[in-house]
Structure formats: structure tokens, C-alpha cells
Image: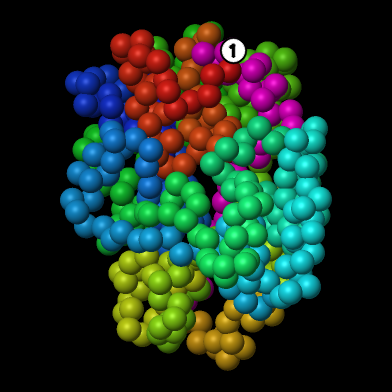
């Protein structure tokens, strides 16, 4: 077989590329997806009357094109929420971002954070994310939130992470603003691009991409894996035993796996050793009781303390009542735990650890553990592409080499850039690479290497 365009992966990036090709009238392409479903890390599943997502996704956008595609896909069947995110620590809710709301801490902890902030030096030279945290936020905020929370998220030593990725991802600090919030006793929770977001009324996050994929379903092949790439002959070997030739290969699968399963030389393959990632468990728990009224507007909660394995818990049933069998009788929590060689957890025990962590951190009552009627776990081997110290140098070797061979690697793990890995970023990278290949239009969303 031969196709002009072959797309590896039917996640947001691959579907963005397929959508744009079809929109441009191109039919000489195929999307190869290893799973039996589309949407990649944005997929959702219906189980026992509950709908579960793979991790915490909310729909917000930097791009009018993406907004139009989503509006058409959902047909107005979505809800809009004002983000209500919290940090759960010291047995209390602290509004997010934590650093802007230290007024709600116990007085001794609040003073420790203020004192550290007054001693901080944001202009100090720093070599990594760990040093940057202390320089910008001071010792107190670093101790109570930034260091423990970020280790729980990334499952990597923070000194092994770069600081160049931060941008929209970490709220920096305005000392004057923090002190004003303390003195005037006012909440400050408006920071961030996702302070307003949409969520599908039906089908969870995956419902968005299932709807998008329907328009190009004839071009999508499920349950097929690319086992080897011969970059010289532009030939893919598939798990089905078939071979497939291509003119242009758009890859959205993990960049390290793409290179390792190819004939590329040692220098390029060696560069993948500097691509670090973490895995994750997404544990969903359905409770056989209605949620307390004062929690029905809450979206998600961050957990920096060691009482629990998870770093974030989402009130998934607050996003849409259709995520549970009966919103008047049940609620659904989704708890996310990262893992790596530096932070080890096992799939066989993580559900019990999660439940115990919810009880130990006093986030749920001990008796609530007996009211859990639905338990689900999703193992995500590739959860976060880590912005490690050596990542950018590795990408400077990998990306130009691949592009010289007509391989265009895009998306969250295809480009290995967490900072450009939201759903809107990922979808638009697929759209823009098609525009580049067809019309030589510059790609605005991806980072240039």
C-alpha cells in the first residue's frame, strides 16, 4: 500500500491533521491508531453507568479555529464553568493559586511563607526548576507547596528539570498583591487561561474527539501498531504484517518510541535517552450518596502533602451530571497519581492507597469508603513529557533530523513539550503541520528546533 500522508495516532493532534486534510479535499491519507478507540490521552469510557476520563481535562482555547471545530462537534451540547480550583492542605481548602492566597493558612505558616517571600530574589541566577522555585517564591512557599506538589506531579527530582517551560503553567508571584490579599482578607483565584472552561454535556472529554472523528472515520484504522519505520524507503511495517509506504509521515506517538523503532542512526537514537517522562494512574471512584451542597461548584483540588499518593482530585460529576447514573444519588471523584523510577506505585494497590489517602487527608469521611460503589483505574505509561534539563538539546538533534526525512512529529509526546500540550495546542499542531505541508504556511503553535 501507499499513502501520500500517513498519520500515527488518533489523538487530538492526529485528528487535527486528519480534519484539516479532509477539509482541504485530500483523501490520500490514513490514520493508524493502536487502540480500539480514538482521542488518545483525551479519551473517555462509559462503565457501569459512569463516564470516566483519562486524567483531568477541561476545554479552553487560544484558537478561534479550534473553537469553531469544537462548537460544530458538540452542537451546543456543553456546559460552561468558572474554574473553582483549590489546594487541600492542613485540613482546609486554600484557593488556587496557593501563592496568592496564603492568607488562609494558619498564622505561623502564613508568616513563614511571607518571610520567605520577603527574602526571595527573583533576579538570582538559577540553573534548574528547584532553584528557580526558591528564588521566586522564597523558602516558605517552596517548602509547603511548590516543592512537594511539583514532585508529586512530575515524579522527578526538581533539580533535574529545566525552568524554561514555565510560562502559563506556573503562576509567578506579585509580593504587593499577596500582601494586599492578606491585609484586605480577599480571595485571589482568577489567574490562568482556564479560569473559564467548557465541558461536554454527554460522553466526557472523549466525546469531543469521537464527534470530530466521525467526519473522517473512513480514514482511521484502529487496533494497528507501527512496529518499524524504514526512513530510507519510507516504509512502515504494521502489527498486521502489512507494509505501508508514505510520502509524508505525521507522528503523534511518543517521540522516543518512534525513533527507537526505526533505522535511524546511533546519534539520533542516543538523543532519546534524554527524553524523560512520567506515567500516571487515573483512579475514578463513584460514591453512593449525593455530594454535599457546598462542594457542588468545586472543580478540582491539589494535594501537596504526603498523606496521599495523588496530586489532584477532580469532582468529575460537577462537570456534567451525566458523568454519573443519577446526580441526585451519586458523585464521582477522579484521583491522579504519577509514577516513575523516583516515585513508585503499583497498579495492584493504587486504588486502595487512593481511598486511604482520601480518608487520611480528611478529604472524605471514613464512612464514605464504605459507600464507594464504583472503582476504576486507567494506567497511563506516558502521562507527562518532562521538561528535563537536557530535553531541549535532545530535541535540537531529533526534530531537524526527522523533518529532513519527511517525518513531522507533533503533539504532546510527538514534540515532547508539555508547555504546548493542551488539547487546543495539540489539535492545532495537527492542523498547522498540514497547512505547512500543503501551502508552506508557518506553524505558529509548535516550538522551532
In the figure, residue 354 lies in which quadrant?
bottom right
Image coordinates for residue 58, horizontal then vertical, percent: 41, 53
Residue shown at 28%/27% (left/top)?
20
Image coordinates for residue 353, horizontal then vertical, percent: 67, 72
Q: Which residues are magenta?
A: 374-403
Within 10 angstroms of label 1, few (less than 14), some, or many (20 or more) residues? some
Position of the N terminus, as image quadrant, is top left
Residue shown at 44%/84% (left/top)?
292
Q: Is residue 396 magenta?
A: yes
Q: Is residue 168 magenta?
A: no
Whether residue 242 sits left or right of residue 228 in the image: it is: left
Residue shown at 54%/19% (left/top)?
448
Q: Is residue 44 visible?
A: yes
Whether residue 290 sits left or right of residue 129 in the image: it is: left
Pick whichever, 39 or 196, lies toward us: 196
The answer to whether residue 174 is above or below residue 396 is below
Q: How is the image coloured?
A: rainbow
Image coordinates for residue 419, horizontal then vertical, percent: 55, 37
Pick whichever, 74 or 340, lies toward us: 74
Whether residue 91 sits left or right of residue 85 in the image: it is: right
Residue shown at 74%/74% (left/top)?
107
Position of the C terminus, as image quadrant, is top right
In the rendered image, which residue does mark 1 sit on?
401
Pick whichever, 281 or 65, lies toward us: 65
Extreme residue toward the bottom, this view: 367
- Label 1 residue SS: helix
Image coordinates for residue 99, horizontal then vertical, percent: 64, 57
Amino acid at each position: 500500500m501507499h499513502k501520500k500522508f500517513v498519520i500515527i495516532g488518533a489523538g487530538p493532534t492526529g485528528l487535527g491533521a486528519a480534519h484539516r486534510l479532509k477539509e482541504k479535499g485530500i483523501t490520500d491519507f490514513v490514520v493508524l491508531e493502536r487502540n480500539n478507540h480514538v482521542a488518545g490521552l483525551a479519551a473517555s469510557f462509559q462503565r457501569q453507568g459512569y463516564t470516566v476520563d483519562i486524567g483531568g481535562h477541561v476545554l479552553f482555547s487560544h484558537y478561534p479555529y479550534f473553537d469553531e471545530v469544537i462548537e460544530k462537534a458538540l452542537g451546543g451540547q456543553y456546559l460552561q464553568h468558572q474554574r473553582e480550583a483549590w489546594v487541600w492542605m492542613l485540613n482546609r481548602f486554600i484557593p488556587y493559586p496557593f501563592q496568592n492566597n496564603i492568607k488562609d493558612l494558619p498564622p505561623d505558616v502564613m508568616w513563614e511563607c511571607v518571610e520567605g517571600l520577603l527574602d526571595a530574589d527573583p533576579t538570582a541566577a538559577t540553573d534548574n526548576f528547584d532553584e528557580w522555585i526558591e528564588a521566586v517564591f522564597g523558602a516558605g512557599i517552596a517548602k509547603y507547596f511548590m516543592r512537594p506538589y511539583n514532585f508529586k506531579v512530575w515524579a522527578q527530582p526538581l533539580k533535574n528539570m529545566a525552568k524554561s517551560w514555565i510560562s502559563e503553567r506556573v503562576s509567578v508571584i506579585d509580593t504587593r498583591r499577596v500582601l494586599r490579599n492578606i491585609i484586605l482578607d480577599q480571595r485571589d483565584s482568577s489567574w490562568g487561561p482556564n479560569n473559564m472552561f467548557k465541558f461536554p454535556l454527554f460522553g466526557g472529554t472523549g466525546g469531543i474527539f469521537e464527534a470530530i472523528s466521525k467526519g473522517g472515520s473512513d480514514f482511521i484504522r484502529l487496533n494497528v501498531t507501527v512496529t518499524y519505520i524504514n526512513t530510507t524507503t519510507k516504509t512502515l511495517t504494521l502489527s498486521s504484517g502489512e507494509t505501508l509506504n508514505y510520502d509524508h509521515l505525521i507522528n503523534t506517538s511518543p517521540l522516543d518510541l518512534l525513533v527507537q523503532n526505526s533505522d535511524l542512526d546511533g546519534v539520533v537514537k542516543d538523543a532519546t535517552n534524554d527524553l524523560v517522562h512520567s506515567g500516571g494512574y487515573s483512579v475514578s471512584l463513584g460514591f453512593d450518596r449525593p455530594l454535599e451542597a457546598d462542594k457542588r461548584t468545586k472543580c478540582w483540588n491539589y494535594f501537596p502533602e504526603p498523606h496521599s499518593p495523588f496530586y489532584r482530585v477532580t469532582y468529575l460529576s460537577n462537570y456534567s451530571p451525566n458523568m454519573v447514573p443519577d446526580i441526585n444519588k451519586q458523585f464521582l471523584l477522579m484521583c491522579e497519581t504519577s509514577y516513575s523510577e523516583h516515585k513508585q506505585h503499583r497498579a495492584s494497590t493504587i486504588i486502595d492507597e487512593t481511598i486511604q489517602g482520601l480518608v487520611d487527608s480528611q478529604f472524605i469521611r471514613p464512612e464514605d469508603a464504605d459507600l464507594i460503589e464504583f472503582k476504576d483505574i486507567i494506567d497511563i505509561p506516558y502521562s507527562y513529557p518532562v521538561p528535563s534539563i537536557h530535553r531541549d538539546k535532545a530535541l535540537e538533534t531529533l526534530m531537524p533530523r526527522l523533518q529532513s526525512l519527511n517525518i513531522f512529529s507533533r503533539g504532546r509526546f510527538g514534540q515532547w513539550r508539555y508547555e504546548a500540550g493542551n488539547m487546543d495546542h495539540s489539535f492545532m499542531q495537527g492542523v498547522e503541520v498540514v497547512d505547512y505541508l500543503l501551502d508552506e504556511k508557518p506553524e505558529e503553535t509548535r516550538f522551532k528546533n
